[in-house]
Image (spheres, coloured by chain):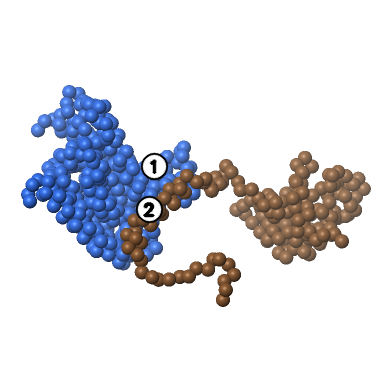
Chain colours: A blue, B brown
């Protein structure tokens, strides 16, 4: 294997790791600020100018807290739970194309760690593993609230993954490829949102449920389950769970912008080329991700939590049939266009 | 019964219409509301830098006043101690000696005057009882200490100094019975 390629990919992986963690850290700050603004408050403003050092202070606090493991807990699983949650949140970003090709040191650098031809399947596979972190954590805590949280998380994720998968299949039908790179490249003209608004809506709602974000944050709802699956967790193990949540929010915002909003494509990109195009593309992609994160947070501070039966009702009786009908209609239209009738 | 206000609301549990069942219109209208709040003026008072303005009738730490010539008003009559529902005030009286006319306004004065700030409930009855306009409650706060002894305020803390007179005009006529 080419050594330069190895170095290039290693640097990219390291960069991605740091960016995802940094983004997750600053998302906590942004979330608190946004919550404050919506509630006519100021938000954190003591650590540094405008409180921008708040995430660092929070991180230090998390590390210095007592790391407590309950006596009756399954110690091994208790430790591995947050690790799995964080691991799965991070590895999804491997298949995301972050921008057009960059030309540096006489080499074409693709801004994607692995351009695997089944990108979407990989993403869905990793997301399904993601529930294990929560499940194992909740189970190992040996606490009924944690177990309730874990059960809710797993049933919710299984229910919503169906509708999410079906709406992703519509996109696959449309582009004829499972590779995220191809899907992005095909949207250089018209973004998929124009053809598939219903699929996007379903995907977005399901993504909220998969992320355990409000209004679907039942696995960790404070008013019913103390803290849900992370009731017994403290110190940086709790920190890892919260961090994993924000990281996966970042990654799924990226995936939503890839599938429906053209990834790094932006209007008028034919006027640019080379490295300028690459940098502008990365900037456009970052803007889209930021907007998605903003909307997700905005929703959290607006809507109250769903009841669990409402959640199941919505998932199975509304979103799944709707996504199936959407898939059917898309398939028929594509078949008609290809002259199969 | 005919309702007296227009706040009465008839509650019903009729099933949701399709529009309401779709959730999305309601969610969007809610999001518009929160977006509007994002640009509102903040209600926060950033405490250590800014402080909330006190009400003009605020009852905080006491002051023992001097008159215009700098003589202590208090004659140690003890009416404030009698009026005090928390029994926080103690004093000992002394007779004014020759040559002390510049210090005390009348022939009798308080040699010691102590208020226990842990007992005091800041009701302002001492102020109301005082016939000499000697004691007033001010808008200053009693600070916190670690030792209980520090909460017993003697004359050194209560009597206003000559160069730093304390303004009590806000409380001079509030809550007082009108003079007949």
In percent of width and height, residue A260 lies at 24, 45
For the residues beneath circles 1 and 2, the answer to whether they share a chain is no
Pinpoint the chain carrying mark 2: B
Classify residue B131 as left or right of residue B5.
right
Check the image and report above or below for A105 versus A20.
above
Whether residue A294 is visible here, answered yes or no, is yes
In percent of width and height, residue A86 lies at 26, 49
Q: Nearer the viewer, mark 1 or mark 2?
A: 2
In percent of width and height, residue B72 lies at 83, 49
Check the image and report above or below for B22 versus A91.
below
Decide which of A301, A90 is in the foreground and name it: A301
In the displayed image of the protein, which residue is found farthest to the top? A106
Quarter of the image for the C terminus of chain B: give it: bottom right
Decide which of A334, A157 is in the foreground and name it: A334
Q: Are there few (<14), some (14-19), or many (20+) residues within 10 Å of tag 1?
A: some
Q: Are there few (<14), some (14-19), or many (20+) residues within 10 Å of tag 2?
A: some
* Residue sitting at x 12%, y 46%: A337
In the displayed image of the protein, which residue is found farthest to the left? A340
Question: In the structure shown, which secondary structural element does the residue marked by tag 2 occupy?
Answer: helix
In the displayed image of the protein, which residue is found farthest to the right? B98
Classify residue A60 as left or right of residue B120.
left
Q: Which mark is residue B28?
A: 2
In percent of width and height, residue A217 lies at 33, 58
* Residue sitting at x 82%, y 48%: B66
Question: In the structure shown, which secondary structural element does the residue marked by tag 1 occupy?
Answer: helix
Q: On the image, numbered disc 1 is attached to which residue?
A: A56
Q: Which mark is residue B102?
A: none
* Residue sitting at x 8%, y 47%: A339
Pinpoint the chain carrying mark 1: A
Classify residue A274 as left or right of residue B63.
left
């Amino acid at each position: 294997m080419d050594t330069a390629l190895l170095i290039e990919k290693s640097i990219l992986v390291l960069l991605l790791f740091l960016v995802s963690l940094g983004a997750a850290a600053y998302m906590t700050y942004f979330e608190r600020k946004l919550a404050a603004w919506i509630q006519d408050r100021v938000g954190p403003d003591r650590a540094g100018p405008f409180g921008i050092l708040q995430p660092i202070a929070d991180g230090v606090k998390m590390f210095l807290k007592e790391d407590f493991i309950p006596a009756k807990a399954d110690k091994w699983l208790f430790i591995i739970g947050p690790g799995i949650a964080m691991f799965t949140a991070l590895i999804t970003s491997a298949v995301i194309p972050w921008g057009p090709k960059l030309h540096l040191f006489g080499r074409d650098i693709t801004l994607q760690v692995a351009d695997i031809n089944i990108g979407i399947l990989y993403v869905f596979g990793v997301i399904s593993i993601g529930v294990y972190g929560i499940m194992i954590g909740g189970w190992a805590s040996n606490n009924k609230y944690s177990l309730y949280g874990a059960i809710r998380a797993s049933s919710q994720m299984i229910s919503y993954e169906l509708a999410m998968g079906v709406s992703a299949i519509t996109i696959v039908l449309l582009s004829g490829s499972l590779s995220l790179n191809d899907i992005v490249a095909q949207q250089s003209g018209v973004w998929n949102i124009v053809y598939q608004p219903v699929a996007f809506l379903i995907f977005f709602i399901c993504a909220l449920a998969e992320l355990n974000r409000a209004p679907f944050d039942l696995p960790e709802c404070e008013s019913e389950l103390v803290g849900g699956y992370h009731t017994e967790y403290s110190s940086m193990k709790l920190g890892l769970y919260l961090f994993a949540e924000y990281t996966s929010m970042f990654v799924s915002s990226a995936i939503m912008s890839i599938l429906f909003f053209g990834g790094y494509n932006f209007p008028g990109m034919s006027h640019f080329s080379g490295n300028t195009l690459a940098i502008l593309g990365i900037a456009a992609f970052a803007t889209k991700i930021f907007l998605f994160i903003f909307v997700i947070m905005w929703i959290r501070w607006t809507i109250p939590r769903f009841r669990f039966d409402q959640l199941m009702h919505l998932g199975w009786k509304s979103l799944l049939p709707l996504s199936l009908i959407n898939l059917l209609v898309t398939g028929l239209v594509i078949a008609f266009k290809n002259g199969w009738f | 019964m005919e309702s007296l206000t227009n706040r009465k609301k008839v509650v019903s549990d009729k099933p949701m219409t399709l529009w309401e069942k779709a959730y999305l219109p309601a969610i969007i209208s809610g999001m518009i509301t929160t977006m509007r709040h994002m640009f509102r003026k903040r209600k926060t008072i950033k405490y250590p830098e800014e402080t909330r303005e006190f009400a003009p009738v605020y009852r905080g730490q006491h002051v023992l006043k001097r008159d215009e010539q700098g003589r202590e008003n208090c004659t140690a009559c003890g009416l404030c101690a009698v009026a005090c529902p928390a029994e926080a005030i103690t004093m000992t009286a002394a007779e004014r000696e020759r040559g002390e006319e510049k210090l005390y306004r009348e022939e009798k004065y308080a040699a010691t005057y102590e208020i226990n700030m842990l007992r005091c409930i800041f009701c302002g009855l001492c102020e109301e009882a005082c016939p000499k306009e000697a004691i007033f409650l001010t808008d200053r706060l009693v600070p916190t200490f670690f030792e209980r002894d520090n909460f017993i305020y003697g004359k050194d803390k209560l009597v206003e100094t000559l160069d730093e007179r304390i303004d009590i005009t806000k409380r001079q006529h509030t809550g007082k019975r009108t003079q007949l």
